[in-house]
Amino acid sequence: MGDLITLPALPVERLREVHSYGFAAGLILVLMLDTNEGAHMPLRLSAVGPEPIGTVTLSTFPHMGEGRRQADKVAVSVLRALQHAEWTIPGSAA
């Protein structure tokens, strides 16, 4: 009989949507806040799509004014790139 291996428990993520930037290329771009105590970079810019994509964290930021401004700048760029992809890829959902 083999040895019993105990895996460490992963922390449960508690996320709250702070802002939705929009929808493009089948994805919704949202800013989420990790409400777990001690989260190092609690603001998360995420793309949310249908399965198998699910939720993908694109970038993280500190939870302060400058972090929110940085997240907004990145989100505008990502949303613009997704919109451009919709317009230029034949057969994409526009």
Image (cartoon, rainbow, N blue to C red):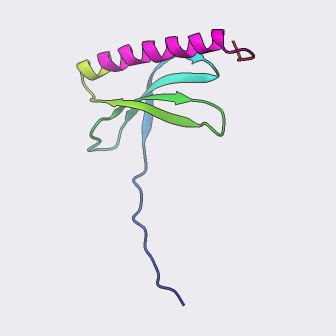
Magenta portion: prevailing SS class: helix
Q: Position of residue 50 (x, y in %)?
A: 66, 33
Q: Would you say 14 lies left or right of 91 here?
A: left
Total labels: the figure holds: 0
Is 79 contained in the magenta span? yes
Against 48, is 81 above or below? above
Outermost bottom residue:
1
Q: Is residue 90 above or below residue 12?
A: above
Q: Quadrant of residue 25?
A: top right
Q: Residue at x 41, y 62 (%)?
A: 9
x and y percentages locating residue 92 in the rendered image: 71, 17
Query: Residue furthest toward the right?
Result: 91
The N terminus - image quarter: bottom right
Asked whether 33 falls inside the magenta stretch, the response is: no
Residue drawn at (65%, 40%) of the image: 52
Between 26 and 35, the one lying in front of the other is 26
Q: Where does residue 58 sit, x and y in percent of width and height?
A: 44, 30
- Left or right of 55, for residue 43: left
The quarter of the image holding the C terminus is top right
Q: Position of residue 24 (x, y in %)?
A: 60, 16
Q: Which residues are magenta?
A: 69-90
- The front one of 87 and 7 is 87
| Residue positioned 44% across, 13% down in the render | 77
Near-viewer residue (59 or 63): 59
Instruction: Name which quarter of the figure residue 61 lies in.
Output: top left
Which of these two is toward me, 35 or 85?
85
Residue at 61% over, 36% down = 53
- Left or right of 39 on screen, residue 83: right
- Decide: is 24 above or below 14: above
